[in-house]
Amino acid sequence: MDFVSPVLDIASCLWDCTAKRAVYIRKLPENLNSLRTAMDDLKNVYEDVKEKVDREERLRKKRTRAVDGWIQKVEAMEKEVNDLLAKGEEEIQQKCLGTCCPQNCHASYKIGKMVRGKMDEVTLQKTEGLNFSVVAEPLPSPTVIERPLDKMVGLDSLFDHVCMQLQDDKVGSVGLYGMGGVGKTTLLTRINNESLKTRDEFDAVIWVTVSRPATVEKVQEVVFNKLEIPKDKWEGRSEDERKEAIFNVLKTKKFLLLLDDIWEPLDLFAVGIPPVNDGSKSKVVFTTRFSTVCRDMGAKKSIEVKCLAWEEAFALFQKYVGEDTINSHPHIPKLAEIVAKECDGLPLALITIGRAMAGAKTPEEWEKKIPMLKKYPAKFPGMENHLFPRLAFSYDSLQDEATKSCFLYCSLFPEDYEINCNDLVQLWIGEGLLDEYGDIKEAKNRGEEIIASLKHACLLESGTTARWSAATYVKMHDVIRDMALWLACQNGNKKQNKFAFIDKEELVKAHEVEKWKEMKRISLFCGSFDELMEPPSFPNLQTLLVSNLWKKSFPRGFFTYMPIITVLDLSFHRQMIDLPMEIGKLSTLQYLNLSHTGIETIPMELRNLTKLRCLILDGISELEIPSQTISGLSSLQLFSMMYFRDSQRDCRVLLEELEGLKYIEQISISPGSVPSILKLLNSHKLQRCVTHFTLQWCEDMNLLHLLLPYLEMFNATACSNLEDVTVNLEKEVVHSTFPRHRYLYHLSEVTIVNCEKLKKLTCLIYAPNLKLLNILDCASLEEVIQVGECGVSEIESDLGLFSRLALVYLRSLPKLRSICKWSLLFPSLRVMNVVRCPNLRKLPFDSNIKISKNLEEIKGEQEWWAELEWEDQTIKHNLTPYFKPQD
């Protein structure tokens, strides 16, 4: 029994094992079909997943590693299954003829077992494929995304300059500013795209188009998308939390942040941008139309993007016109130059007009377009719909309506005309554009602020500052002026602001004058009138400006019907000999400028102008003003009567009338006699009003005490006995409200010419804001300022002597030995011109002088420069590059 039982157990086990193996063999055909079906189902799932992956990848996403591994497994499994199915079918075909038994039981068992196992694997893969909720994720953003950029013309040198700044470790931020359409965005795009060539230089290059309105949230969103910050740290978070998320990512990176089109200062730290201080490898570059934005955002370097030089401008213009058009006729290149010059180097204008002319292949087409571009630029293709609206964004951003009106006013002057800033502000005052300010001084200050703001907005440009004057000038770019005239005359519903402008040599016909009835402002800078049959009517006219180029006097009755005119400027109209009587009927007039005309007598009727605020009578040879005329101008605030030729003019009656005016605030005058001067200097009221004071041919005065606390300009010409100009601090007339060291605080310009006995100018010690010093042909002058006189040496250090001095002209001063005995820094010096001053052996430059960034030249005879004595030779070494020999 004991022997049989183990044998039976072994037999049972063998039977069980054999039975299981038999199942694999027996069910092989069935299992092959099941495997085939399972594989078909898996392939369907595979195709679905693959379609999803392809769709996501077309959306610039990347398949997940799990999905990619699954796809590879399925593709490999399909091959394995096909091989296994083929082997299984082959095994079934090899069964013994007429029986169900396989020829090789072991092989059939092995295949059957493999089929069964593969079925499980296929099922598992199918289940895994059905469970994919995410098949692809967004690609990590490339370090630099290339932006569309046409071939850049004319900005290569500026691009190289910006790149040089970015390579300086001390320059973390660069501001690019300039007028609209000048190429700032193009330059920034070039910087972005060039970063592709140096991928390793920055970990991230981020471009943000800021525009308006600029919000921290808007900029944060763009930076977030670039940096791939996890959504759980972003969505639903506050601005401060988003700031922290950006900051914590960027602080570990070397980044280049490019901000385009900033209109107002943007707080980058509030966005989350780490500071780019000295030593930081990260950089920030931004573009703006306002130089003040560069300042307010703390740009280490502010770089103005200017209009193109002529060669570059014409190359850009030809590029957009096209070679086929340019070369289609021999006359077209010259005509193309005429058109391109109207763009004045502004790239956007060159491109817009170049495209418009691209199909003009005959000279006739160009000849028709040129007059339109010059006279009616808004009608030229692309100007009104494309160019002007883009430029007008700068106008729309101006802070108030007064500033906008002041800007439009500048378009009344011709192309390339340099406008004297002081004259411009006076016109604005007369026009009533600055009426909200209580007095002339406040209005003048506000006017200067407006000019500065228009320059910061690149709507006005600095003119060429006169070398012999401290006066400043501005001008309008030609295309900006065209845009301003479009805004004033033709834009939308602003028809009431119509301007009439003539700056060409032409005869104005009577029927053209008739069209001016609707005009608000008329500017006549060239040409002449045809004879008028009857006086014209100008019911809407507020402003009439006439220049020195107007050929004839006005027709009779021209000024009769101007019921609301406020500004009449006839200055430099030398053809005008008599002032028409009807001027006295312009009861609304607030500004009248008759300077440098041929008028000899002011009519009594002028006293009827009771609303007149500004009267300017400079440079008239011999002008008679009837008594009681000025006293009738009850609203007069500003009076100017300088540079006349009558050397013996007695102004006492005029001064008495001015003194009696209630609202008089600013007087510029040339008293022609000692009694007149004494009358002026002994009147407390007049002292406080005089801003410009000129002495001419006053031979009876040897010492002048300047007691004029608001004096801005002083001129003495041909005063043959004048020895000194000073401030008499002992006189009771000096007001206690003015400390002695501030008595000439506003004096900015001094000119002394042909005063033979002048020995010194003690008054200059009290003029810390002096900008121009011009001394010519003074044979006795030995020293400009003498140490020790009137406490000079004691207060010099408190005054900042000559710290604002920009222009110095010394000519024909044979005895001059010294400008000043002690050394000075001259931080504002721009030009020093020394001619025929043989005894001036030393210039008062301090050894610690830092060359002013504004310094242009020091001019004199070569021999004089070579013999100068220097406190320190390094001074000469530093100044030598600026020395220019006298011609």
Image: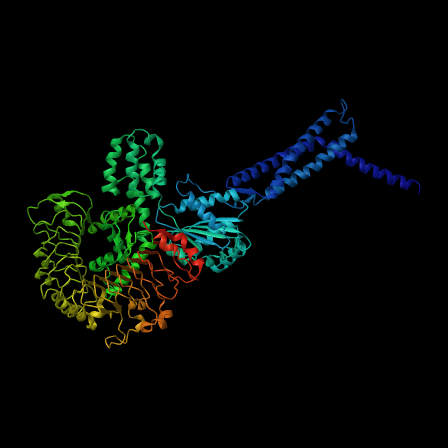
Report whether residue 856 is seen.
Answer: no
- In the displayed structure, does residue 334 sit left or right of residue 278? left
Front residue (pair 505, 872):
872
Residue at the spot 23% in from the left edge and 69% down from the top edge = 704
Looking at the image, residue 863 sits to the left or right of residue 128; the answer is: left
Where on the picture, by quarter, is residue 780?
bottom left
**Residue 494 appears in the rendering:** yes
Left or right, residue 726 beside residue 164: left
Residue 431's x, y, as percent?
A: 20, 58
Residue sitting at the far top: 97
In the rendered image, residue 465, in percent from the top left (x then y), is placed at: 30, 54
Residue 287 locus on image (x, y percent): 41, 50
* Colour convention of the picture: rainbow
- Is 715 situated left or right of 646 in this image? right
| Residue 510 percent location from the top left of the image | 10, 44
Identify which residue, 487 or 174, lies in the foreground: 174
The answer to which of 247 and 519 lies nearer the viewer is 519
Q: Nearer the viewer, residue 145 or 415?
A: 415
Asked if residue 761 is positioned above or below residue 452 in the image, the reply reads below
Image label count: 0
- In the rendered image, the quadrant that contains the N terminus is top right
Looking at the image, the residue that sits furthest to the left is: 533
